[in-house]
């Protein structure tokens, strides 16, 4: 488990480039970063499902294929960054979301692809 008390309760924390620095940009002891929390969450899910990493890679492969990339272009799915742009229909609608996805196509040489994600159709947060 993580001790988040130092990061959450400190009124001296200023979010400059890191969650774990004070107003003088000094490292705060016992600070939990986003990466620590993410790694803990991934480890918990991996214990629940030993095939999780392979399922993630397959989902990424499918996502890249739907985005129009061939298997020859992809090689290793772990090299790609997939940016999900939140598509909503009921509130906070992104008016030019398709234009943003098309603009993102310019970053394919850097192995970045953008997709739309309709969070209103999601069955669960997982």
Image: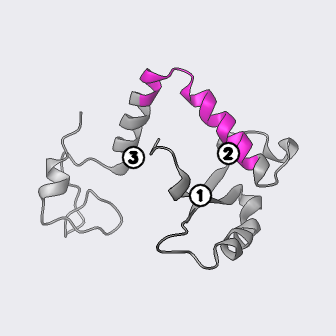
What is the x, y in percent for residue 81?
63, 52
Between disc 3 and disc 1, the foreground one is: 1
Which class describes the residues within 10 Å of circle 1: few (<14), some (14-19), or many (20+)? some
Where does label 1 land, which residue? 117
Where does label 2 land, which residue? 79
For the N terminus, give its image quadrant: top left
Residue at the image point whose x is 54% and y is 66% from the top: 88
Q: Quadrant of residue 78?
A: top right
Q: Is residue 117 magenta?
A: no
Q: Earlier in the sequence, mark 3 or mark 1?
A: 3
What is the x, y in percent for residue 106?
75, 69
Q: CA distance from mark 3 to mark 1?
A: 23 Å
Image height check: is 64 above or below 1? below
Magenta-drawn segment:
45-64
Q: CA distance from mark 2 to mark 3?
A: 18 Å
Image height check: is 125 above or below 113? above
- On screen, residue 81 versus residue 22, left or right, reads right
Under circle 2, the secondary element is helix
Q: CA distance from mark 1 to mark 2?
A: 21 Å
Residue at the image point whose x is 52% and y is 20% from the top: 50
Q: Earlier in the sequence, mark 2 or mark 3?
A: 3
Q: Is residue 46 magenta?
A: yes
Where does label 3 land, which residue? 35
Residue at the image point whose x is 76% and y is 55% from the top: 67
């Amino acid at each position: 488990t993580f001790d988040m008390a130092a990061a959450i309760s400190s009124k001296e924390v200023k979010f400059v480039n890191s969650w774990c620095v004070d107003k003088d940009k000094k490292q705060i002891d016992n600070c939990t970063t986003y990466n620590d929390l993410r790694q803990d969450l991934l480890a918990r899910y991996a214990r629940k499902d030993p095939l999780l990493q392979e399922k993630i890679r397959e989902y990424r492969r499918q996502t890249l294929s739907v985005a129009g990339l061939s298997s020859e272009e992809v090689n290793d799915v772990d090299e790609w960054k997939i940016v999900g742009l939140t598509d909503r229909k009921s509130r906070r609608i992104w008016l030019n979301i398709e234009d943003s996805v098309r603009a993102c196509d310019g970053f394919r040489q850097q192995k970045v692809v953008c997709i739309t994600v309709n969070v209103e159709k999601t069955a669960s947060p997982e």
